[in-house]
Image (spheres, helix red, strand yellow):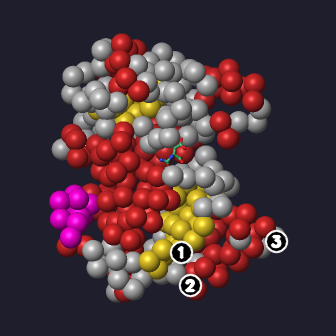
Amino acid sequence: MRHLIQPEDLSNQEFMDLIETASHILAHPELYKERAKGKILASLFFEPSTRTKFSFDAAMLRLGGEVIGFSDSQSTSSQKGESLADTIRIMSGFADIIAMRHPLEGASLLASKTSRVPVINGGDGGHQHPTQALTDLFTIYHYKKKLSGHKIALIGDLRYGRTVHSLIKTLARFKVDSFYLVSPEELSMPRHILDWMQANYPDIHIYVLHDMEPALRDCDILYMTRIQKERFFNEADYLKLKNSYLLDAEKMQLAKKDAILMHPLPRVNEISIDLDNDPRSVYFEQAAMGMYIRMALILKLLEECDD
Ligand code: NCD
C-alpha cells in the first residue's frame, strides 16, 4: 500500500510524472471530471487549514469523487479519548483514500500503520508537508520550465516551517545551484537537515544569512514563510521575531526581473499587499496549482490501489 508521508516516498520520476499530469489537468479539466467517480476521500484535519484541506476536497470533487471528514476534531470521538490509530482504522473502512493534518510530528506515519487505504500527509506538526512540496515544484516548473540550476532563497521561519523542510530536501534532488537560508538565528534550518544536505548533496551551495538583501539580489526563486506562532513555547519569543522579514515593493526592486516570489500562505505580514500586482508575485497562483497537483496525486494513488 502506497502512502505519501514525506517527499522521499516519491521518486524524481514520479515527481515529474505528477507535474506532467497536473499540467494536463490544468489545460483539460473536463477530461478528468469522472475519473474518481464512486470513490471517497476522507479529509481529516486535526489542525486548522484553508488551502490544504479545501484544495484536497475540491480536487476530489473535480475528479467526480465524494468527500467526508472534518476540519475540527472537537466534533469527533477523539474528544472522548479515541486514539488516532483507532480513528484511522475506522475511517479507512469508510473511504478509499485519506488526507490528514495533525499537530504532532509523525502522526501521519502512525496513521499509515493502521490504515487500509492510502494516507496522504497534509502536514504533521513542524515536520513535513509533502503535498506543499509537490505544489511548490509544480509552480516552479510552470513558471521556470525547469527545476535544475536555480538559486533559491528560503526566508523566514526555517526552524518550525514544515513547508521549507520538505521543499529543501526535494529541490536538492533536482540539481539546483544553491540555497540562501535567511532566518533569525533562533529560527534557523534544523541542523539535521543541513547535515543531510552536506552528506548527500555537497555540491549545492548553502548560504546561511540573517539579512534578506543578498538573497533578494541573487536568487531566481524567493520563498517567503510565516513565523509559525502556534509552535512557539512563549508569546514573548514570538513577538520578538514576528516582524523579522517584511518584503515590500521598495525592497523587491533589488530582486531580479525574472525572479518569482512564492509563499505557501497564509501570509501574516511577510509580503506587503503592494506586491500583489507585481508580475513576479505568484503566490496566489501557487495556491491554485495545489489543487491540480493534488488531483494528479489522488488519481495516482487510487490507480495504484486498483492495480
Ligand atoms: C503552510 C502549513 O500549513 O504548513 N500552509 C499551507 O499548507 N499552505 C504554511 C503555514 O501555515 O505557514
Q: Is residue 25 magenta?
A: yes
Q: Secondary structure at mark 3?
A: helix
Q: CA distance from mark 3 to mark 1?
A: 20 Å
Please tell me how crowded label 3 is: few (under 14), some (14-19), or many (20+) other residues with Cα within 10 Å: few
Coordinates of residue 158 in the picture (x, y in percent): 54, 34
> Where residue 94 is drawn, which disc sits there?
2
**Marks 2,1: beta carbons within 8 A:** yes
Say which amino acid is labelled 2.
Phe
Q: Is residue 125 above or below residue 271?
A: below
Say which amino acid is labelled 1.
Ile
Between circles 2 and 1, the one closer to the viewer is 1
Say which amino acid is labelled 3.
Lys
**Residue 158 visible in the snapshot:** yes
Q: Which residue is mark 3?
A: 80
Which comes sooner in the sequence, label 2 or label 1?
A: 1
> Along the horizontal axis of the image, is 307 left or right of 53?
left
Q: CA distance from mark 2 to mark 1?
A: 9 Å
Q: Is residue 134 magenta?
A: no
Which comes sooner in the sequence, label 2 or label 3?
A: 3
Q: Which residue is mark 1?
A: 68
Please tell me how crowded label 1 is: few (under 14), some (14-19), or many (20+) other residues with Cα within 10 Å: some
Question: Which stretch is magenta?
Answer: 20-30
> Along the horizontal axis of the image, is 141 left or right of 160?
left
Q: Which residue shows up at 58% across the image and 32% down it?
A: 227
